[in-house]
Image (cartoon, grey):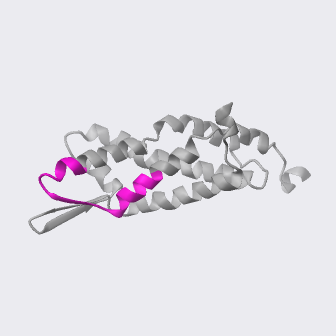
Amino acid sequence: MLYRANRLTVDRWLALTVAAAIVFVIANAYPVVRISLQGQHNEATLWQSAAALAHGPIALIAVPTALSIIVVPFMQISLLAWVLGYARIGRRAPGFAQAMRMLVTLRPWSMIEVGLLGILVAIIKLSSFLQVAPGAGIWATAGLMILITLIANRDIHWLWELTEHKPFRHEARA
């Protein structure tokens, strides 16, 4: 009950979700790390890191990695933005029940914090052999970790009550 009392308003929750979407784009578009050795350098984004895993000896781990640090957070942000956008006007989004079920199902599969921890461990280990510099993607990933925790771990059940089914104008005529 204490957890439920500490809920965000729809507007604040939607604003945090939009912020998470922006940070998600930055985290996936910009390099997470830059590695240099004897004048040569290489950079990698989250997508490139997951793809590199697919070509190595531990290729089986590439799919869960991509799912937990890229696909699931994207789905959480997208579904929350969809549901909250309609909740803001007091309506249920099309596919509301399915979206709500999917949000509950996805909650334990978002592991941005685990991915960030793995990246930090890799940076620390590599720094003794190579010049390693964190990129904008790692800072965005850290911000995304905080935002995903704020938006995805909230009690979403009150959205059912807030958005009692009200027919749209074209549904009322039918």
Residue 74 visible somewhere in the drawing: no
Residue 141 located within the stretch drawn in magenta: yes
**What residue sits 49% from the left and 35% below the top?**
108
Residue 15 location, quadrant: bottom right
Residue 134 location, quadrant: bottom left
Q: From the viewer's perspective, is 104 left or right of 62?
A: right
* Residue furthest out toward the right: 173
Residue range (magenta) = 123-144
* Residue furthest out toward the left: 38
Q: Position of residue 139 (x, y in %)?
A: 38, 58
**What residue sits 55% from the left and 35% below the top?**
105
Q: Position of residue 123 (x, y in %)?
A: 24, 51
* Residue furthest out toward the bottom: 39
Q: Position of residue 54 (x, y in %)?
A: 27, 46
Give whichever of 138, 5 is nearer the camera: 5
Q: From the viewer's perspective, is 39 left or right of 19?
A: left
Q: From the viewer's perspective, is 136 left or right of 165?
A: left
Residue 164 visible somewhere in the drawing: yes
Q: From the viewer's perspective, is 47 left or right of 9?
A: left
Quadrant the N terminus occupies? top right
Q: In this picture, is 161 found above or below 8?
A: above
Q: Position of residue 64 (x, y in %)?
A: 37, 39
Residue 138 located within the stretch drawn in magenta: yes
In this figure, what is the number of numbered marks?
A: 0
